[in-house]
Amino acid sequence: MSVAVIGVGKSWCPLPLNPVYRKCGTSTRLAALQCGECSNRCVAAVCKMPSMAANQRNTNLFHYVDDSGTGWSARGEIDTAVNALDGSSALVAGNPVWIDSARRQTRKAVFFDPATFRTKRVVVFTAAAYAAITGATTLAVNVPGETATVTYSLSQKIPERQPIGKTSRNLPDHP
């Protein structure tokens, strides 16, 4: 059996060569079937066209000011809604890169969607922006597969954590 491939809105669907027609306005034309509508039941391995590009999370380095006033370069999201409240500013050349670890973590705000139970963690780059985030703060999030944004509410503020340098004791050696 030979197969014709017809382009569709979401994917390519292999169809038998017997054409399927649908009425479209005033003229009859070859139908554009969505994956799964054909009698062959498309399999993911057979579908040729990649699906539409998802709204992926993009990141960049921004200027981060820690609680002691030192400038760092920390990674954060490139998102208009996030950048409006996180206090991010352009990267300053020469600043050391802040890498989160068990001992050192940037301050964050956690937002929560009570309908889907999804959370979103956002790095907050300045102490002033951290102080400005209140319980009434919301975040409009683009969810993959949704056309409209979903509003997340603040659920938690996580303070910065980093080790503090201390002087060591110098004990005399034992004889």
Image (spheres, rainbow, N blue to C red):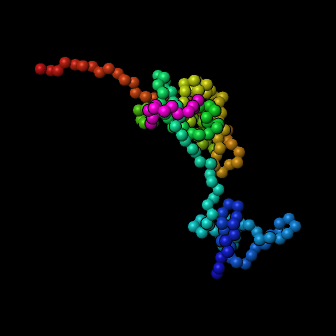
Per the rendered image, the range of residues in magenta is: 87-99
In the displayed structure, would residue 85 be above or below residue 68? below
Foreground pick, 60 / 107: 60
In which image quadrant can residue 6 be found? bottom right
Foreground pick, 168 / 26: 26
Quarter of the image with the N terminus in it: bottom right
Tell me, yes or no, if residue 162 can be seen here: yes
In which image quadrant can residue 15 be found? bottom right
Image location (x, y in percent) of residue 160: 48, 28
Foreground pick, 41 / 128: 128
Main SS, magenta residues: loop
Q: Is residue 92 magenta?
A: yes
Relative side of 18 to 104, left or right: right
Image location (x, y in percent) of residue 45: 57, 67
Image location (x, y in percent) of residue 53: 63, 54
Relative side of 63 to 146, left or right: left
Q: Residue at x 57, y 27 (%)?
A: 130
Q: Is residue 132 magenta?
A: no
As drawn, which residue projects farthest toward the left? Answer: 175
Foreground pick, 80 / 31: 80
Q: Residue at x 74, y 66 (%)?
A: 32
Tell me, yes or no, if residue 108 can be seen here: no
